[in-house]
Amino acid sequence: MSAVLHDLSLSTHHAGPSAAQHFEIRRFDAPLGAEVIGLDLGKPVSSDDFARLHRAHLEHHLLVFRDQRITPSQQVAFSRRFGPLQIHVLRQFQLPEEPEVLIVSNIRENGQPIGLGDAGHFWHSDLSYKETPSLGSMLHAQELPAIGGDTLFANQHSALDALPGHLRRAIEGAKAEHHYLARYEELRARNPWRPKLTQAQIDEVVPVVHPVVRTHPETGRKALFVSEHFTTRIVGLPEDESRALLAELFEHSTRPVHVYRHAWRDHDMVFWDNRSLMHLAAGTPDDQRRKLYRTTIEGDAPF
């Protein structure tokens, strides 16, 4: 899955406000994704290099920046070049010095979790439960387990393209409800340390309605936009029909033919497009420590 095919383009050397860096972008032999080798995000990224990264991100939907020994503030600064950042509703897991950073970790200190340990337990697109869901997320490896800890990504453009005719007809013009609380209590039952939400937090994540098929605002490509984690119902359908249709869509959209499995390496930073992909955490054994820092870039209202 993660074998590399070839370098798609050589680095540019045009003068810009910052010196260009020499780096390669190598497409994975997978339904999505490419790795970026030789770029140091701790140094200024020129406008030409940034434009090249932007194009590659739109083409491949996911970029793996290898060997990034950057600080959280440098991650925040690079993320902000793509747009405003969104702060997760679970503010207790913010990085204190950088509130835009969500700590994703199964580590406990003094008996208390330092981060969101069960993030990605179900397939989802980040913040699909908001009026303006995420454009993309960046996840930077801080501490990795010796075994486990992979992340799976599913291409929702190819999932839509491969949709059988009866399902394509069933979702034509359809809208679906997304709700952060859809499976929250189920997760709390599995992980009692997952925090109980305050009323203010509940008010922040009221249900929203989005198209079942969304159009990518930059490429115009269409993608499925429902997930087992946050999508609760198809608007206007009886409950049993809605449940059956969603079950078919969930199963189809995450078939192996659409999926890239990322095996993390030290200092990887992965940047994926939430308008094109869903993702899932494969799980980490309880005795293995895992910590990553996530920034989330605000997107547009789906259409």
Image (cartoon, rainbow, N blue to C red):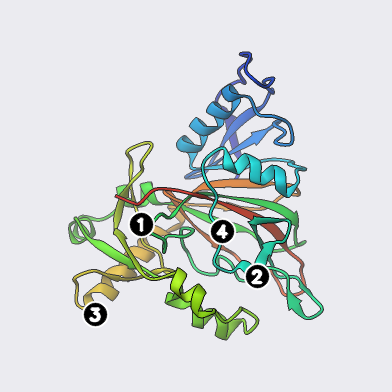
Left or right: 50 as drawn, with respect to 66: left
Q: Residue furthest front?
A: 200
User: Please, what is the three-letter code of the amino acid marked with disc 2?
Assistant: Gln
User: Please, what is the three-letter code of the amino acid marked with disc 4?
Assistant: Ile
Residue at the spot of label 1: 225
Q: How far apart are marks 4 and 2 (CA)?
A: 11 Å
Residue at the spot of label 3: 240
Q: Crowdedness of circle 3 by 10 Å Cα count: few (<14), some, many (20+)?
A: few
Q: Do the residues labelled 3 and 2 touch (CB within 8 Å)?
A: no
Left or right: 95 as drawn, with respect to 196: right
**Which structural element holds mark 2?**
helix
| Image: 191 above or below 170 | below
Name the residue at 50% across, 68% down: 122
Q: Which residue lies furthest to the top in this view?
A: 14
Q: Residue furthest right?
A: 110
Q: Crowdedness of circle 4 by 10 Å Cα count: few (<14), some, many (20+)?
A: some
Q: In the image, residue 17 lies at what x, y percent?
A: 64, 20
Which of the two discs, 1 and 4, sits closer to the camera? 4
Q: Identify the mark nearer the N-term, 4 or 3.
A: 4
Residue at the spot of label 4: 87
Q: Identify the mark nearer the N-term, 1 or 4.
A: 4
- Given residues 101 and 245, the one toward you in this image is 101
**Which structural element holds mark 4?**
loop
| Image: 196 above or below 272 | below
Marking on residue 92: 2
| Image: 137 above or below 45 | below
Q: Distance between the residues labelled 3 and 2?
A: 37 Å
User: Which image quadrant for residue 104?
Assistant: bottom right
User: Please, what is the three-letter code of the amino acid marked with disc 1?
Assistant: Phe
**Which structural element holds mark 3?**
helix
